[in-house]
Amino acid sequence: GEERENLTYELFGQAIRELAQAVADDGYEPDMILSIARGGLFVAGGLGYALDVKNLHVMNVEFYTGVGETLDMPVMLPPVPNVVDLSEKRVLVADDVADTGKTLKLVHDFCSEHVAEVRSAVVYEKPQSLVKCEYVWKYTDRWINFPWSVEPPVVRRDGQVLDA
Ligand code: 5GP
């Protein structure tokens, strides 16, 4: 087959409805959706509408890249969600993909200290993921092209790269 998963915006629309349906069919009623920026923002926004959840929060998690080095572990970047906002809530963590699963594990561990219940929803999960998400649209071991990151950032009229 193809060597990559190619998610289009159109297919993403279908994926989100199906992912939301799986959550609803399971009887899970989150009080809050916690998105992991940036890819998880698309997923969280779609799930928020489909599940009629207006309470959305964002966590910024990145694999920290120093000069010529990549750390093995993801780190939370500020602002970190206020634990008071999380307390006693049923949380649904939303992300684009669980690959190594390290990002979701970090968020899951952060949440589980404060919340009533935490479950995760992702569009894709890979076999090596150390977190097994409750809600997965598709399992794959391929590299995924997401519609929001498959193209490079736009360039300014003067040719300078944005955010360089
Ligand atoms: P983790 O390895 O912690 O599960 O995933 C970290 C992040 O790496 C994901 O949220 C995503 O941004 C990026 N990533 C992992 N696998 C893929 C992939 O197959 N395609 C793309 N575009 N990004 C990926």
Image (spheres, grey):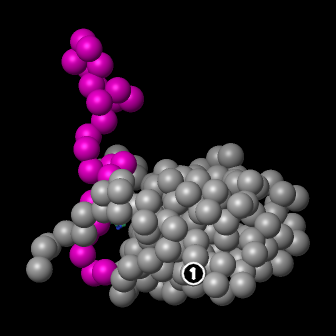
Kind of residue sitting beneath label 1: Ala
- Magenta stretch: helix, strand or loop mostly: loop
User: Is label 1 in a helix, a strand or a loop?
Assistant: helix
Q: What residue sits 62% from the left and 68% below the top? A: 93
Q: On the rendering, which quadrant does ligand 1 occupy?
A: bottom left
Q: What residue sits 27% from the left and 60% below the top? A: 145
The answer to whether residue 48 is left or right of residue 69 is right
Q: Which residue is mark 1?
A: 22
Badge 1, how many Cα within 10 Å: few under 14, some, many 20+?
A: some
- Asked if residue 38 is positioned above or below residue 47 in the image, the reply reads above
Q: Nearer the viewer, residue 60 or 67?
A: 60
Magenta part of the chain: 140-164
Q: Is residue 123 visible?
A: yes
- Asked if residue 137 is positioned above or below residue 79 in the image, the reply reads below
Quarter of the rendering containing residue 84: bottom right
Q: Is residue 113 visible?
A: no
Answer whether residue 18 is magenta in the image.
no
Residue 23 image offset from top left, x and y in percent: 62, 78
Residue 126 image offset from top left, x and y in percent: 36, 81
Residue 42 image offset from top left, x and y in percent: 50, 53
The answer to whether residue 159 is left or right of residue 83 is left
Quarter of the rendering containing residue 110: bottom right
Q: Nearer the viewer, residue 25 or 164?
A: 25
Residue found at the far top of this picture:
158
- Asked if residue 77 is positioned above or below residue 75 in the image, the reply reads above
User: What is the quadrant of the N terminus in the image?
Assistant: bottom left
Q: What residue sits 43% from the left and 68% below the top? A: 15
